[in-house]
Image: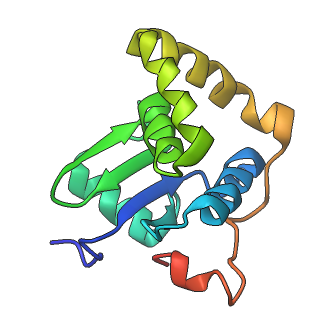
Amino acid sequence: MLDIPKDKKIILFDGVCNLCNNAVTKTIKYDKKNEFLFTALQSKKGTEIINYLGIDTRKLDSIILYEPGVSYDVKATAALKIMQSFGGLWHVTRIFYLFPESFRNHVYEFVAKNRYKWFGKKEQCMIPTKELKAKFLD
């Protein structure tokens, strides 16, 4: 059994990706309801959750939104669900559900495939500041 809070949604992200780290920072900023906790895919806790969910990361190199006891989502659907939780104008992102999931994921995968080339890569996973440490599982 996983030792994680059951009342939070867990976002697993690529800890060495600059685009992903910026997305985490923005998510923390817009998470007014304090719904999310974060962990890098490469971290011990990230690996533990991935193994628990039975996800093969060789086939899935993506953001994962895990709602303990409910379900998990990946790729574009995970990103859309995260953005919609922010409220306000972010609800406009619902329009992307008009496109088939396969199309949304194709666009997501194109960006993901090029993320290091376009946005760069860190040598190690992001280390949260003291102020942000409570938002991370590791």
Residue in the picture at 47% in, 55% down: 12
Residue in the picture at 51% in, 19% down: 96
Question: In which quarter of the view is residue 133 placed?
Answer: bottom right
Which residue sits furthest front? 88
Which residue sits furthest bottom? 130
Let me know if residue 55 appears in the view: no
- Colour scheme of the picture: rainbow
- Closer-to-camera residue (39/6): 6
From the viewer's perspective, tell me whether residue 82 is left or right of residue 9: right
What x and y, as percent, mark residue 34?
Answer: 47, 71
In the displayed structure, 33 sits above or below 81; it is: below
- Closer-to-camera residue (119/78): 78
Q: How many marks?
A: 0
Let me know if residue 132 appears in the view: yes
From the viewer's perspective, tell me whether residue 26 is left or right of residue 5: right
From the viewer's perspective, tell me whether residue 127 is left or right of residue 4: right
Question: In which quarter of the view is residue 137 placed?
Answer: bottom left
What x and y, as percent, mark residue 64?
Answer: 42, 46
Residue in the picture at 49% in, 9% down: 103
In the displayed structure, 104 sits above or below 65; it is: above
In the displayed structure, 47 sits above or below 132; it is: above
In the displayed structure, 27 sits above or below 108; it is: below
Q: Quadrant of the N terminus?
A: bottom left
Question: In which quarter of the view is residue 78 placed?
Answer: top left
What x and y, as percent, mark residue 4?
Answer: 29, 75
